[in-house]
Image (cartoon, rainbow, N blue to C red):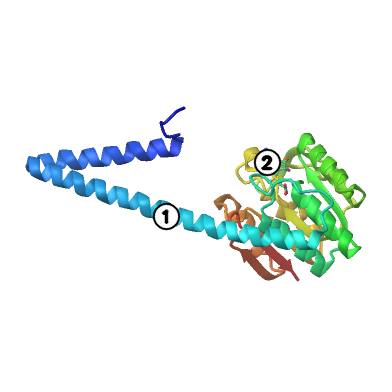
Amino acid sequence: MSSFPHLKHEDTRRLVVSSLIILSIAIAGSFISTETAVIATMVGAFTLGSLFVMHYHRETANQQVSLAEHFQDLQFLQSQLGLRKPLPYLTGWSASPALASRLYSLIEEHKPACILELGSGVSTVVMAYAIQKVGVGKLVSMDHDATYAEKTRAELQRHQLDHLVTILHTPLILTTTGGGGGSQPWYDLAQIQDVAPINMLIVDGPPLSTCPDARLPAFEQLSGRLAPGCIVVIDDSIRSEEKSSLDAWSSACNVSRNEDIPSEKGVSVRYLK
Ligand SMILES: C[S@@+](CC[C@H](N)C(=O)[O-])C[C@H]1O[C@@H](n2cnc3c(N)ncnc32)[C@H](O)[C@@H]1O
């Protein structure tokens, strides 16, 4: 049995930095007198300790709010989807409960005829349930990774929804961006020439690990294929890397409404005119 606390890199860095701060305070105090050094060290240690406690208290409070939001969204999905099997966990790389429940509601409310998703997964399964419920809609989901494309196909089959969705393994190819001659890896659109006009677009890929502005080309590459009134959903919109992508969609002259859901990862919806 180990009684030593399990430290993460983050904790180690914090411990080293606080020790160095307290040591510096002690050294600075010792130039005045030994008593000053002792008092300054105690005050420094107390202040740093209090800051840490307040920080963790705030983090815990935020996590509790997040958990309550997740619970509410999951409960909503559970009540609406009529699940045949449990969904894979909506954590980590998967769609958050906030994204999944928003996607469901958007399909139920707007009944988009043609939906294109960039980045397949649990979100695809949730949308397939929604399509089955409303009785209209064609969903095409692209994944740059063959393994994840296959996982999503298998999940759709498990839920008996595979007939409602086309999952395409769409490798990333060097794509020209920005008109300045730059290029970056992005989905090869050759396989989706006939997917248009798009009534709902979900931007949840490619992952940032493929390129810092991985999702930016979506606007340039797809805006010409969107139907009037198209709904564009951008996941992870809280990330600084998505800012330029969001700006591109928001400044498009034909956006009629912006909706930004302040969930843990951030979900943004742009309603085009
Ligand atoms: C943000 S994920 C897409 C998530 C998807 N919309 C969902 O709801 O599950 C973007 C891409 O990351 C890849 N991916 C999914 N899970 C992953 C994991 N655990 N590790 C690495 N890549 C992953 C897949 O290729 C996916 O298309």
Horizontal arrangement in the rendering, residue 55 relative to residue 152 (left or right): left
For marks 1 and 2, give the CA distance: 42 Å
Residue tagged by mark 1? Answer: 57
Q: Is residue 127 left or right of residue 22?
A: right
Within the image, what quadrant is residue 254 found in?
A: bottom right
Residue extending furthest toward the top: 1
The image position of residue 23, as x and y in percent, is 22, 38
Q: Is residue 32 left or right of residue 74?
A: left
Q: Amino acid at mark 2?
A: Gln
The answer to whether residue 263 is visible is: no
Helix, strand or loop status at disc 2: strand
Is disc 1's CB within 8 Å of ligand 1?
no
Question: Quarter of the picture for ligand 1?
Answer: top right
Disc marking residue 184? 2
Residue occupying the point 72% across, 56% down = 100
Taking 254 as reference, is 121 above or below it? above
Name the residue nearer the viewer: 50 or 250: 50
- Amino acid type for the residue under numbered disc 1: His
